[in-house]
Every structure is written in C-alpha cells, then in structure tokens.
Image: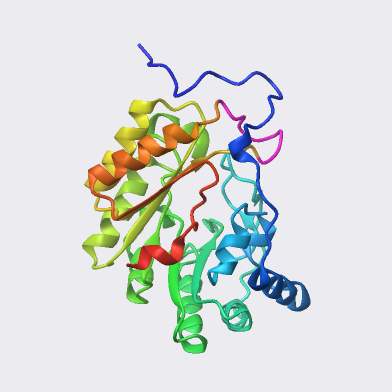
C-alpha cells in the first residue's frame, strides 16, 4: 500500500506559500556583475535560469556557467531547457567561459551542461577542455562540475576525474519510484553508479541534489539520502520543485520549512559533510562552501 505523500496534493492554481517569495537581488557586487554580464553578453545559468539565489551567490563571488549549447538531447519532465537537435560543438567555448569567469572575477565557478547523447564522447572532451581553460586563465578560481551521467560510460567519467575539479556533482533529482516519469532517459541506479565510480577513481568531493514536491513520500526521500551516502556522496542539496511551464510536470505539493529542516537533520545524521535544504535551494547554492 502506497504511503501518504509528504503533504496534501495541491488544488489547481494555488498561490505559492510565503516561504517561496523571492527577494529581488541587490548589493554592490551584484550590480557590478550584472553590468558585466549585460555589457559582454556573458552566458550564466544564474541569469538565463532566473535563479532565486543569484544576488546572494554573486555577492559571494560564485556563478554557474552552462557549456555545450542550450539544447538538450533528453526531455526530462521537470526541466525547462529546450529539447531537440543540438547545434555543432563550439570548440572556442572553453576560452569564452574562461574569459567570462575572469571578467566577472569569480572566486568559485560551477560548470554544468545539457546532455549530449548525440556525441560519441557525450561531451566529455569539451568538459575537460573547459576545466583546463578555466584553470589556465583563472588559477585561483575553484571549480565544481555539475555533470550529466554520460550514460554511465566510465571512460567519459574518467575525463572529468583527470582534470581534478574540487567538487564533482551529479544530481539524482528525484526518488527511485519517480525516476522514469521525471527523468525519462535517466536511471536511478546508473546515477548512483556514476557517483560511486567518481569516488572509486579518487575524486575527493562528490555531490548530488534532489527536488521535492513531485509526489514522493517522506520515506522515499530518506531512502534516497541513505542511498547517496551508501555511494559515498559528501554533499547533498534539497530544494522545492517548481513547474517551469504548463507543459512540464505539475507541482504535487509544497514542502514546508519544517520538513526541509527535518531532512537536513536526517542528512547530517547520515554523515553528509554539507546538507543544503530549503525551498529555494538549487544545485549550486552555497557551492563555495562545499569544497571544504
């Protein structure tokens, strides 16, 4: 018998709760970086994804950049990124990203990408080239790479390990039962294997993230946290799923701050080094802390 979900299903068009209200980003550092982004047409996920934490992260010298284009070969039910046939790989992109990081004087950069199942190497060569370019141009900048699963092919994952980012992250996104509906082409066990393999190959710090509000139960969330720790993940982020458009999966429930606090406490008890857990938490939230 299916256990109750964390909270009651939402009636249609219910207003977001007060804890999901976002303050407009402010501050001198934010204003400076916003000006640079607009002037030089720099591409950050922070701006293109309208991240609620942009002002806070930029104020701390952290920003997220997406490589390998903006069209994904997968069609996950939660994700607002376009799906279709991606453009040809731009081999000048590593230098462009590195220059953007230098212009913005970023202390800690997060790199992510669309899935590129259309490429023989799944985009892993571009990943390694980008990390190397950032290292050359920004030797004092630390890095987190938020990678796709590369279909679990270990030689592609090895390219990430070989360039030694301070943190390698791969998001599990949801609980096992909902994976087929939410992530479609991804597999729960494959993502767990990627995370475990990274550690086996010597990656010092690994990280994953999960969104809540898609119909998961409390017990399933705890089971997922346990599975992540069993696979030696060091850091976990837990946030509220928000529907990008009407074509995407609906929000089944809004998780309360008290429930997020409970999951944080459980995660710390399980042994995670860092647990970021609240409604507006996203994958790169407080990312600069996770290198320690």
Q: Nearer the viewer, residue 73 or 42?
A: 42
On the rendered image, what quadrant is the N terminus found in?
Answer: top left
On the rendered image, what quadrant is the C terminus found in?
Answer: bottom left
Residue 169, x across and y down, in percent: 40, 58
Residue 85, x across and y down, in percent: 66, 55
Count of labels in the image: 0
Q: Which colouring convention does the figure follow?
A: rainbow
Residue 99, x across and y down, in percent: 61, 83
Question: Is 85 a magenta residue?
Answer: no
Start-end of magenta stretch: 244-252
Q: Is residue 71 above or below residue 11?
A: below
Residue occupying image coordinates x 24% and y 68%: 202
Q: Nearer the viewer, residue 226 or 115?
A: 226
Residue 136 seen: yes
Pick out the residue farthest to the front.
27
* Residue 38 location, quadrant: bottom right
Q: Is residue 152 above or below residue 215?
A: below
């Amino acid at each position: 018998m299916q256990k109750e979900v964390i909270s009651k299903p939402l009636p249609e068009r219910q207003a977001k709760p007060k804890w999901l209200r976002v303050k407009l980003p402010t501050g001198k550092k934010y204003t400076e970086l916003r000006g640079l982004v607009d002037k030089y047409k720099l591409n950050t996920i922070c701006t293109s994804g309208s991240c609620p934490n942009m002002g806070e992260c930029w104020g701390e010298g952290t920003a997220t950049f997406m490589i390998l284009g903006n069209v994904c070969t997968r069609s996950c039910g939660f994700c607002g990124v376009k799906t279709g046939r991606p453009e040809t790989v731009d081999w000048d992109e590593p230098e462009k990203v590195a220059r953007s990081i230098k212009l913005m004087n970023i202390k800690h950069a997060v790199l992510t990408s669309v899935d590129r199942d259309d490429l023989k190497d799944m985009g892993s060569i571009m990943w390694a080239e980008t990390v190397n370019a950032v290292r050359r141009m920004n030797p004092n900048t630390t890095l987190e790479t938020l990678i796709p699963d590369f279909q679990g092919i270990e030689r592609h994952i090895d390219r990430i390990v070989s360039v030694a980012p301070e943190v390698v992250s791969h998001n599990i996104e949801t609980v096992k039962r909902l994976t087929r509906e939410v992530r479609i082409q991804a597999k729960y066990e494959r993502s767990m294997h990627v995370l475990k393999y990274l550690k086996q190959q010597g990656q010092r710090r690994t990280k994953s993230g999960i969104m809540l509000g898609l119909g998961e139960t409390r017990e399933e969330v705890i089971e997922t946290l346990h599975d992540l720790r069993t696979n030696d993940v060091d850091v976990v982020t837990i946030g509220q799923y928000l529907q990008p458009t009407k074509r995407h999966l609906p929000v089944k429930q809004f998780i309360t701050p008290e429930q997020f606090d409970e999951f944080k406490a459980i995660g710390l008890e399980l042994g995670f080094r860092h647990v970021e857990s609240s409604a507006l938490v996203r994958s790169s939230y407080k990312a600069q802390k996770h290198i320690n």
